[in-house]
Amino acid sequence: MDTNEDWATKKETEKGNRYSTDLDFINHLSKRVKSGWKATRTNFTTGVRGSLHTIQSLARLETLGVKNKNTREFIRNQTVQKTLSMSDTILKFFFIAQNSNIVWTLRSLPKEITNTSMGK
């Protein structure tokens, strides 16, 4: 949970462990076919409460080629806003699901979320 001071560091370590074999495989295959490509991994860890390590995220955006400081700040702010907005939506629908008919709840969700068509 992003209430701990070092939550982002722990998540970075977890992601490093989780994706290291994939990254190794891609680089091995690239070297084997002599493509000249080298894959790297860049994490952007956002906490469930909208936490985003500012200096780390801005630096990573710069390594991806976003040179303008205002643009990096804008991207960081939008990331936090969208994360909080999605969390808010999830909590609203969870409340509806807990306090009403589940069929009605599913019908009220956007199709992009349910990815199903509900018949009558």
Image (cartoon, rainbow, N blue to C red):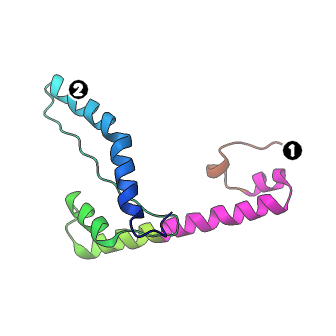
- Residue 3 lies left or right of residue 40; in this view the side is right
Q: Measure the alpha-carbon separation of dots 1 and 2.
A: 50 Å
The residue closer to the viewer here, 102 or 118, is 102
Q: Earlier in the sequence, mark 1 or mark 2?
A: 2
Residue 81 coordinates in the image, percent (x, y): 48, 71
- Mark 1 surroundings: few (<14), some (14-19) or many (≥20) residues within 10 A: few
Q: Residue 77: which quarter of the image?
A: bottom left
Q: Residue furthest bottom?
A: 70
Q: State the SS at label 2.
A: helix
Q: Residue 49's spot in the image, x, y percent? A: 52, 69
Is 22 included in the stretch rendered in magenta?
no
Q: Quadrant of the C terminus?
A: top right
Question: Where is residue 38, by image quadrant?
Answer: top left
Look at discs 1 and 2 and give the one toward the viewer.
Answer: 2
Tell me the chief SS of the magenta region: helix
Question: Dot 2 corresponds to which residue?
Answer: 29
From the viewer's side, name the closer residue of 116 and 81: 81
Mark 2 residue crowding within 10 angstroms, few (<14) / some (14–19) / many (20+): some
Q: Amino acid at mark 1?
A: Lys
Q: Amino acid at mark 2?
A: Leu
Q: Circle 1 sits in a helix, a strand or a loop, which is it?
A: loop
Residue placed at 78% from the left, 56% from the top? 105
| Magenta span contains residue 88 | yes
In the rendered structure, the answer to whether residue 12 lies left or right of residue 69 reads: right
What residue did someone put label 1 on? 120
Q: Percent position (x, y) of residue 64?
A: 23, 57
Residue drawn at (85%, 60%) of the image:
100
Q: Is residue 8 above or below residue 29?
A: below
Q: Observer-nearest residue: 22 or 10?
A: 10
Measuring from the top left, give residue 53's x and y in whole percent.
35, 69
Q: Which residues are magenta?
A: 81-108
